[in-house]
Structure formats: structure tokens, C-alpha cells
Amino acid sequence: MLRRVVQNFTTRLATALISFGIVWLTARYLGAAGRGAVSLFVTDCAAILLFIGLLGGSSLIYLAPRRNLWHLLLPAYGWAALVCAVGTAAVGLLRQPGPGYLLHLGLLSLLQAFFSINTALLLGRRRETIYNLLTLAQVALLAGALLAAFWAGGRWVAVETYYYAAYLAFGLPWLLSLGPLLRLPDPRRRHGRRLRATTRELARHSRGAHFSNILSFVNYRLGYYFVAYFADARAVGVLSVGVSLMEAIWLIPRSAALVQYVDLVNSTSTGPLPDSALRVGRLAVLGTAVAVLVLVAMPPAVLTATFGREFGPAQAVMRLLAPGVVIMAVQMLITSYFSGRARYRLNNMASLVGLVVTVAGGLLLIPRLGIAGAALASTFSYAASTAFLVWHFRRVTGLGITAFLPGPTDVARAWQLLRQR
């Protein structure tokens, strides 16, 4: 398991580094206001994609080893098309952007949806290498297209350039992902009755599995909308840089949680996590804590030299987010355990607890403290939802928070792994 986690982590590290390049490009060339506009567009896309998971998402990974892939793909694609149309219309009513913005939002959200559906099915069939390559190709294409356009200068240094780069970045990997799916042995016959039964099963699992993802997204990004309302797009841009840098660290626990989840859904065991999985989890928490310490120790001058003078306040955002980022590493591991055991209700309740804290913190803190208030509200939300999950994890497995806290043996093991590298 550790070898697969390392492979997954390596891919996610490369992805995070390239994503950092995207943040740098948009911040450096477009400024805080332009970076804020891109962040709001990405957030709008992500909000639409969340509802696609109500007939897909992680449930595709869960059902892929058990059902015909084409009986999963067809309803997932159909639902994605409907959600993207309705979601784009909802954004038009709520935020009232221009028609050009809505056209890009609808088309790009649909491309992203199709790509995520294909890769989820491949991951469910343990085609992890293909999944990693496609994920890496997507961010590399986006970064490469932005770099080429911004380097050319002139009219290409604009927010609209991000949209055109995203078409390439999601469209080409989506087309490439069709090849591995077509090579799988599943018969491509519809079998109406089986298709309907699989669709109902997918909907049942998705509703339980994905509701917590919707709430989690709101916890992660509601602060952007609060800041946009109480301040402006420039403040959103500064906040997004600090948040992006800190959330990049989550590639460590997410790598461990993803491999743990895939193993659980492909296992017939119903017991607690094995010692090997707990050991990997502790190493993930240790790596997260070390990475957070390194990042918050970075002088503000490095941020301003890298992104521009406007982004110096992002350092304060990072420091306030630091405890919450480490706490969330534990939550991700526990959430993947409950998801792998199809106990979605606990994850949903934890996300709901976090949402209540996010809304209260956003309304109370952001008008007074600005982006610092948004960071504090996030940290409080992460702490509350994680405490809820830890309590239930202890009730179910008999293991408490200490099962995920690294000790001297884990530090020695991590040092040994680094020396081997």
C-alpha cells in the first residue's frame, strides 16, 4: 500500500507544483483583480460540478468494480449535461455575469464533468497509472497554454485567455480517456432493465456519498463569496493565493486517503483499518504538519517577489489557516474510511457541523477582519467537523485521534524513507 501511496503522492506533487505555476501565472500577469476573477470562475465551475456527483462522483469508483461500466457512464453523462445547463442558468440568475461568461461556464463545466466521470471509472477499475497520467496531463496542458499565451503578451494577457486554455486542458485529456475505457472488457450493450437498475443503484449511493462533498465544498469556498460581497475581487485574489498554497499541502493526506478508499471498496473485509493503513495515515499527517511549518515560515517578501506586491497579506491568511490544514489531514483519512464502508451519514453530519461554523464565522468575522476573518472561519470549521468525526470513529472502531498522531517510530520511518530516496 505504501508504494502505491508514494506513486499517487508523486503524481499529486507534480500536479500541485504545476497548479502552483497556474496560480503564479494568473496572479503575476493578471494582478489581484484578475486572479480574483479567475478564482470566482473556477469556484462557479466547481459548484456546478458538485451537483453532478449526485449521480456519479465517488460512487462511480465504488460501483465500477461491481457493475458494467457503460451502465454507469450513460446515466452519469446524461445527468452531467442536465446539471451543467441548469447550474449555468442558476449562476446567471444569482450573479448576473455577461453571456460570454455563461457560455464558457456551461461548456467548460461539461468538459470537466465528462473528464471526471471517465477518470473515476478508470480509478475504480484500479487503472491508477492511467488515472495519474491523465490528471497530470490536464494541469500541464492548462499551465503550458497559459504560459504560451501570456508570454506572447498583448491582448492575450486577459482573464478570457484562461477560458481558452481550459478548453484544451480538459478537452484533450477527456478524448484520451475514452481509449482506456473502450479497451475494458465490459460489453457495450445497453440491456435496458440492467441499465435502469444500475442507474437507480448509482443514484442511491451517490445521494449518500456525495452530500458531504457538497457541504465540504461550501465550507471550503463560501468565504470567497463572503469576501466578494463584503470587499471586492482584489481581496478574493489575495485570499485565493493563500488558500491555494495551503490547500496544495492536502495532496499528502489525499494521496493516502484515495488509496485507502480504493482498497476498501475492493475489499470484502468489514473490520477496522489494518495497522499498515494506520501507519500510512500517521505518515501522511506528519508530512502535512512538516509542510505546513515550512510554508508558514516563508517570509512575506518571498510572496511579494513571487506573485507581486499586492499579495503580501496572503502570508497572514496562510498562518491562520495552518492549524486547520493539519486538522483536515486527519479528517480526510477518517472520511475515506466511512465512505469505503458506505457509512455516508456520518460524513454528511460532520460536513453539516462544519457548514454551520463556516456560515456563522463568515458573517461575524469577515465584515470585521476581512480575509483574515475568512481564514479563521475556515480553521474553526475544520476543527469542529473533525472533532465530530473523531468521536464517531472512536465509537465504531475503538480508535481515537491518537491512532493518526505520529510518534517517534513514525518519524524514524519517515526519515528512513527519505534516506532511501
Image (tube, rainbow, N blue to C red):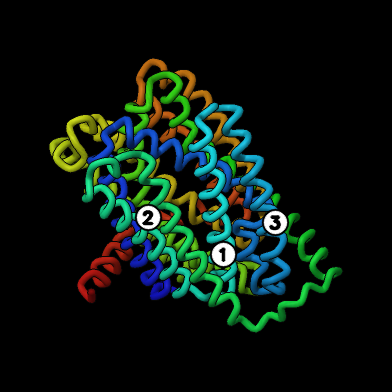
What label does residue 52 carry, if any?
Answer: none
Residue type of the residue flagged with mark 3: Gly
Distance from the alpha carbon under mark 3 to that under mark 1:
16 Å
Is residue 291 shown left or right of residue 256? Answer: left
Is residue 125 shown left or right of residue 227? Answer: right
118 or 263, which is in the foreground? 118
- Farthest-out residue, right: 193
Where is residue 307? Give x, y as percent.
21, 40
Distance from the alpha carbon under mark 2 to that under mark 1:
25 Å
148 or 319, which is in the foreground? 148
Residue at 59% x, 39% y: name it.
Answer: 88
**Tag 2 and tag 1, C-beta contact below 8 Å:** no
What label does residue 120 carry, if any?
Answer: 1
What label does residue 285 carry, if any?
Answer: 2
Q: Nearer the viewer, mark 3 or mark 1?
A: 3
Residue at 54% x, 27% y: name it.
Answer: 96
Q: Which image quadrant for residue 18? A: bottom left
Where is residue 235? Give x, y as percent.
33, 27
The first of marks 2 and 3 along the sequence is 3
According to the picture, the residue beneath numbered tag 3 turns out to be 78
Q: Nearer the viewer, mark 2 or mark 3?
A: 3
Location of residue 293 with respect to 340 vertically, above or below: above
Residue at 60% x, 47% y: name it.
Answer: 347
| Whether residue 116 can be seen here | yes
Distance from the alpha carbon under mark 2 to that under mark 3:
39 Å
Residue at 29% x, 47% y: name it.
Answer: 292
Mark 2, secondary structure of its residue: helix
Mark 1, secondary structure of its residue: helix
